[in-house]
Each structure stands twice: as structure tokens, then as C-alpha cells.
Amino acid sequence: MEDIRGKRVVVGMSGGVDSSVAAYLLKERGADVHGVFMKNWEEEFDQGYCTAEDDLRDAESVCETLGIPLHKVNFAKNYKERVFDYFLETLKDGLTPNPDVLCNKEIKFKAFLQYAEELGADYLATGHYARVERKEGKAYLLKGIDNNKDQSYFLYLLNQQQLINTLFPIGDYEKTEVRQIALDNKLITFDKKDSTGICFIGERDFTDFIMQYLPTAPGDMVLPNGEVVAEHKGLAFYTIGQRQGLGIGGRKDSNGEPWFVADKDLANNRLIVVQGDQKELYGKGLIARDLHQINPIDWQAVNPRLTAKIRYRQQDVKCQVTLLESIPGQVDRIQVDFDEPQRAITPGQSIVFYDGEICLGGAFIERKLD
């Protein structure tokens, strides 16, 4: 563990328990800790739900308790241009984006990193459940100790420059330990509920929110054989594997099992659905693009140990990677073959690779392989 006594560490304060305890642990290690509250969403972008004011008050309370300064910075314009606009464009293309991945790359470890440097930071810190190991001048991203909270999946797009002076103080702790530390040290956030879902949507209905920004484009909801069973609102409003909100009911031949989104036919604006856990929900592999490697990878050497996640909190699954293109200046595409078929492989989401505890990087899922 680095000796950070006297070093200036700028920590992102979200108003939640994780960043609160991260700041506490840094101060306990003797660092010159400065908190920063980032506002990433402006209320005028929509008339919806926003917790920024409550979160700011909680961050101010924690910093006062710890005796550290809190700086406030507005990255809403950066967020809208670099994250939210991409989110909407990807939805228009019928894909399912993950804005948290891009937010980490473009906001927390780019705009925020630049701001931290202006504050004279020696290190940047956040409340992510992940770890960084430094060896021979290189930084390696590791999973957090708490398997249920590990957030390395969302950090796979980070590079050496972003990781080398980054600290994840709570990565060595279980969530229950983090809450206990907050309680023991009278931090107001000790029992604050974790935020879930997409940050700018909050507790709102996803479809209602997206309809404020994207026009509906209704089309047929069909079985794999082409039989029409209902009408969808627009492919942007559905994701692969989705069960809720399909509005299919009253069919005479229904067997009572739930319906799921199995695929999207973008060319014909059709949503393909199945009833029950059918084979159409599974894929033996996938094609992915924009391969990002945190450190250069010898795929031949690592393939025997390679595992991957195609969604957050999924159990690691064994797989093999084949490079389809690896030409300087061109997009890297890969083929991933799983040892066991995987359910709900979702274009637009990320596949993230691991060698044991080490997060190697990842890519954007382009399509599944049946």
C-alpha cells in the first residue's frame, strides 16, 4: 500500500456511503484530503427526478465531520455532450448502451481528473469497489474484495495514465464493513440507500423518460417464426432478455410462462419475443468491437485462464478470444466463444475480460453468435 502521508488526494464525493468512507480512510492514512462534489446533470435537461441537492447536503455533512474541504464543480455540459448524447444515439440504433462505463472514462477519470490536477492532486480517489496494483511502473486494475459489489466491470475503459495515480480506498472492504466504518465514525451516510439503475433516470420509468427525447417508432412484436403477437413502442425502449412491460397477454395458446425479448430485427423494425426460457435467448458466442486493453495482452498465453462478464454482477464465465482485426489505426474486432451458451447477450453492452483477479479490458458487444 502506498505511503500517502502528506500527499494531496482529491476524492470524488457523491453523497453516498462509499465515497464517504473512502475519504475517511484516506484521512486516516495521513493524506491531505480534498473532497469534490460533481454535478453531472442539470434539472433543466428535463422535468424529472434529481437527487443532486440532497446528495450535496450529505457530502457537505460528511466533509464537515471529517474536517476536510469540499469543492463543487459542474460537469453537466461535459456529461450531456460526452455521455448522454451518446446514450441517445446508441438507443436510436436499437442498441442498449451502458452510460456508467462511459461516465467513468469521460467524466470521473477525465474531466474530474483534470480538475483534480488543477487542485494540485498527487492522487485521485473514488468510492469504487475495485483495486489498483502497481508493479514495475505499470498499473493493473483488480476486482474489489466484495464479489457482490465489485465494480471493475464499469472501469475497464481506463488506461494507464488514468490508473497510475488512482486510489480505490474501499476496494479491500466488504460493503457491510464500509457501512460499519461509517456508523462508527458518525458519518451521516452510514445507512443511505445505494443508488440503482441509470444515474440520470433515477427512480423514474425508463420508457417514460426516454420518450421525452426519442420519438416512438411502433412496429410488430413477433415470434421467431414471424407470427405477429403484439405491437412494440419502438426498439429503443426494449432490451434483450427484458421481461417486464411487454404487454403481451390474452393469447389463447398461452401456456402461462413469462414472455421475453429475444432479439431485435433492426432492418424491419421488429421485436422478436419468446415465451419461456427458449433457445433463442442464448448464444454460444459473440462478436465485439473497439477492443480496449488496460495493459497489452498476450491472448494466446491468457486464453486458457480467461473469463468474462457480459453484464455487471454476472458470475465469471470461461471463454476463448480470437482477434478478427488488429491493424494499427483500425477498429479492433474480436470473436468470443463461451464454454457454455450465455443468456441475453445484448448488443451495445460491454464484455469485460479477466485473468483471475486482474481486469484485462473489454469491448462493446456487436452481435451474438447462435
Image (cartoon, rainbow, N blue to C red):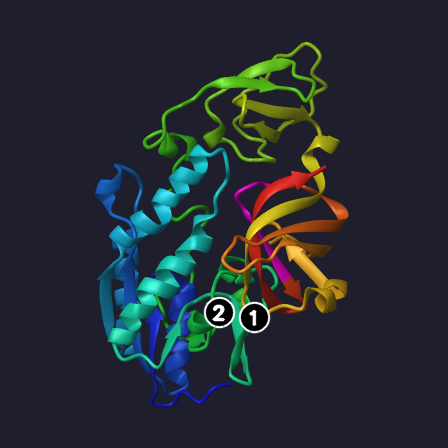
What residue lies at 64% left-to-right and 69% top-to-bottom? Answer: 357
Q: Which residue is mark 2?
A: 178
Quarter of the image where the C terminus is located: top right
Is mark 1 in CB contact (under 8 Å) with mark 2? no
Amino acid at dot 1: Asn
Q: Tell me, yes or no, whether the highlighted magenta stretch contains residue 156.
A: no
Q: Which residue is mark 1?
A: 295
Question: Bounds of the magenta span?
Answer: 346-353
Number of the front mark, 1 or 2: 1
Instruction: Give SS at disc 2.
Output: helix
Residue 246 drawn above or below residue 196: above
Residue 22 drawn above or below residue 215: below
Classify mark 2: residues with Cα within 10 Å, few (<14), some (14-19) or many (20+). Answer: many
Left or right: 17 as drawn, with respect to 281: left
Classify mark 1: residues with Cα within 10 Å, few (<14), some (14-19) or many (20+). Answer: some
Left or right: 244 as drawn, with respect to 68: right
